[in-house]
Structures are given as C-alpha cells and as structure tokens.
Amino acid sequence: MISYIGVDLGQKGAITIQSKLPGSKYQFDIIPFWAHHGGTRLHAPTENEMYDIIRNILKRSGETYVAIEHPIFMPLNGKKAIASLHENFGLMKGLMIASGATHFWYPKPREWKTLTKANGDDKSAMTKFAARLTRHKNLNDMTSDSVLISEACRLHFK
C-alpha cells in the first residue's frame, strides 16, 4: 500500500491520509486536531495518541510520503501563535520520523495550492474543491486544507 499524508498545522488543522492498494481507489482518513461540537472545543489528540495514530497508519503502509505545511509568518499573528506553529511543526516532524516515515516535503501554502490548483483563501471554496477528492465524514472547512495538502503530496512525489 502507498500512502500520502497531508498535515495542516493550524489551530483548526488536521492530518489526512490518502492510501491506495494496487488496483483500487484512494481511501481517505481525516483526523482533526480539534474536535468541535456546537461551537465547543472537545478533546484534541495528545502527543502520545497522535504518535499511536501515525505509527499504526505507517505500519499498514508500504511507501509513505509526508507533506507538512511549513509555517509562515504573518504580520497579524502574535508571537505566541508563531511559536506554537513552529513547536507543532517540529513535533509533527519528530512524530513522523519516530513512526518510520522517510519521504518528506515541507510546502508553503502557496506551493501546495499551486500544485493542486486550489488557489485562494476562501474556506468554503477550498472545502468544495476537497470534496471532489473525498466525501469523508470529517471533511469540513477546518480539515479541507489537510486533504488538499495530501493531494499535493501525491502530485509532488508522483
């Protein structure tokens, strides 16, 4: 099995795993970093839970390719938000390496959007674009970027 993993590190980010067995269609699994219900933030996976999730995915995969969105500095982001993004970037990179991933790509938003032809910042448009790839129950405006990053990963390593 071959897998492409897309990671959107934002506060409302997610991990999407696109997997394919020979002769079959791509299967998607979307794991939100934050579960929401009626506007209330619920349980987010801990570092240990995230490691177990990633390790189990990579155990089932033959070849695994990972794209982790590279954090960018925005003038409106506070110092704490920037530090948090970089901490999460390092944590996710470490979790992937510890789980056995060997092929990495760290695209900036413009890179993965260009590759997938999903230009723009309109979240509803991005969600509709991602829905062309999968109808997964966890696909929404908070997880669509990770779906598109996983698709960009597939195109990048193709």
Image: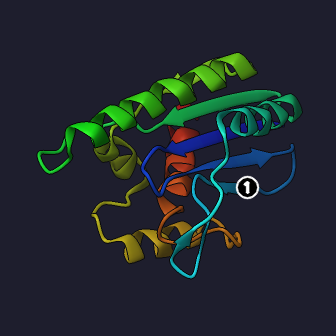
Please give left or right for residue 36 compared with residue 81 in the image: right
The reply to whether residue 72 is in sight is no
- SS assignment at label 1: strand
Q: Position of residue 135 (x, y in %)?
A: 68, 73
Tag 1: residue type?
Asp
Q: Seen from this angle, which residue lies furthest left?
A: 75
Q: As displayed, is residue 86 above or below residue 152?
A: above
Tell me the residue at 54%/61% (across/down).
Answer: 143
Give the residue displayed 70% in from the left and 69% down from the top. Answer: 136
The answer to which of 27 and 55 lies nearer the viewer is 55
Q: Which of 143 and 132 is in front in this view?
A: 143
Q: Is residue 146 visible?
A: yes
In the image, residue 42 sits, relative to residue 58, either above or below, namely below
Residue at 57% across, 46% down: 150
The mark tally for this picture is 1
In the image, residue 119 lies at what x, y percent?
30, 60
Q: Residue furthest bottom?
A: 38
Give the position of the N terminus as an image quadrant: top right
Q: In this view, does 30 lie above or below 140?
A: above
Q: Position of residue 131 (x, y in %)?
A: 57, 72
What is the crowding at mark 1: few (fewer than 14 residues within 10 Å), some, or many (at least 20)?
Answer: some
Quarter holding the C terminus is top right
Coloration mode? rainbow
Q: Quadrant of residue 70?
A: top left
Q: In this view, does 32 lie to the left or right of 112?
A: right
Q: Name the residue under label 1.
A: 29
